[in-house]
Amino acid sequence: MHPSIKSLLQDIDLERIALPEVQREFVWSENQAKDLVDSLYKGFPVGYIYLWRPKDSKPFRQIDTHSIGEREPEWYILDGQQRLTALTKIEEGGIKVRFNIEKEVFQLENTAIMNDPKWIQVSEVWSSGTVEVARALKEKLGISLDEIYEKYVPRIDKLYRILDRELPIHEIREDDYGKIAEIYIRLNSKGTRLKKAELYLALAVLHIPTEFRSKLDVLEEEFDDWDFDANFFMRCFTCLATGQSKFEAIREYVAHEPKDKIIGILDELLVYLRQALNLLNTHLGLTADKSREMMPSEVALVPFVAYLYSRKGEMKSDEEVGKLIYWYLMASFWGRYSGSTETALDSDLSALGKEDSLAKWISNIVDETGRLAINDSDLAGKFTKNKILMLYFVVQRNHGLDWFSGTDLKNTQQIELHHIFPKALLRKLRVPDNEINDVRNMAMVSGKANRKIGAKEPADYFKSEGISKERLVAQLVPNEEALWHKESSWLQVCR
């Protein structure tokens, strides 16, 4: 089977070919699409297209901008989505690629070439054909048709004949959806690489396509502000469903568990992830906006959610809540899951359901780091998210207020890190960047306050802006005015 590009695009338009729900959205860049046309023009191979013809219907999406119609597709794309979607977008003008008839090069449309008649639109050539484009060029270039035909028509026709280029198709006629998922996983380990989570998402979607995909859509919409990706949701789902962190555990689970149970896990994930984020907001002041600057890793949220799931959301005492929050702070600061992620997760998950599992989790951190106490050397050097989170926590416990408005920082939407001794000031003194950006030289202020402070030294702006000592102390700024000058031993004293 070697259909032409033109016939493939027609089949997509007529809904004979569609995407199964397992497939992702279009992720190629416009430059990748342009390079594909360039390769086709030069006669380079562009790889196989893998089409699957199932025995019964599976929910599908029409390619990109095409809406779902009533026609039942005959084929589904397992591999080649990005290439066919790119060609569809170019043909329809969604991706504007132009071809220089003089130099035989392709370029994405821009204002510099739009008015140059020698840069013709690929979509126009494909829709109008060689003859019509040649006639239009005669008028635009002001030369004879004979000259157009002699010099440019062979190149224009070569571009048009890309539509006649036959692509090698590999047909898959298989009714075992487990095998199809395996084929999809292997095919998509190459090309535009998928994360392992997305591959096993494919497996789950193939078993219960409509329900699983729709539940994931609900999760993505609910937590859109947090920027969680498929990797995070699938990791949570895997841990809740199997008690393990490895995505491979999903293979057996979705193959043997009833559909209602699988979907039920996604419903519970929504409930307990919402509860986890509410707890972090209540006790740490973490919100979606602040998480981008302060949450070292979303992986620590996975066992957090799993703990709530194991308790069915019931937290028996304030002590239990406090211990869970304490564990989260320590796990985040010490990077509990930054090394062998799955090994650490599995170790912690195995403690769930046992007596005082939180104590075991905290003990696991100690086993790895040797201690929980944070000393001066742990804070030294450039600020990182784990240090920022800890600073924010301490400032909150001190009831820290914005230096200008007096607003509780916990209730401030936009918090910026302010260099107490400004960067410009310290660079003049040739202070190394790692000391300039030391977390101990940082305060948390609103965006407005940060801009107002500018590049003055603390001795100046603390007084000129009328910042009270109470507000400074709440943010761990020392009371000693002698330390507010650039000549002081600020970093050596380490507020």
Image (cartoon, grey):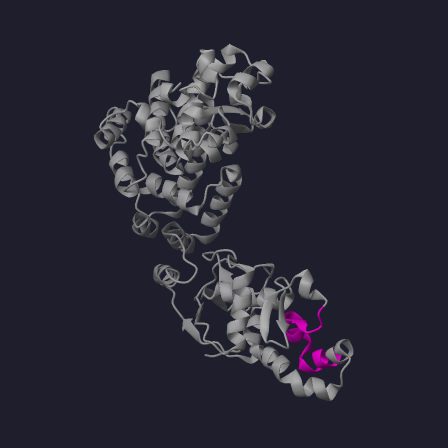
Q: Is residue 138 above or below residue 289?
A: below
Judge whether residue 63 can be spotted in this image: no
Please report the residue visible at 52 percent of the width from the left and 17 percent of the height from the top: 459
Along the viewing direction, whichever of 86 and 276 lies nearer the viewer = 86
Q: Is residue 91 above or below residue 220?
A: below
Judge whether residue 463 can be spotted in this image: yes
The percent coordinates of residue 343 (x first, y second) are: 25, 41
The magenta segment is 116-136
**In the image: residue 121, left or right of residue 493:** right
Along the viewing direction, whichever of 455 and 176 lies nearer the viewer = 455
Q: Is residue 457 above or below residue 205?
A: above
The percent coordinates of residue 28 (x first, y second) are: 51, 59
Please report the residue visible at 36 percent of the width from the left and 52 percent of the height from the top: 196
**For residue 135: magenta?**
yes
Chief SS of the magenta region: helix
Residue 387 lies in what quarter of the image?
top left
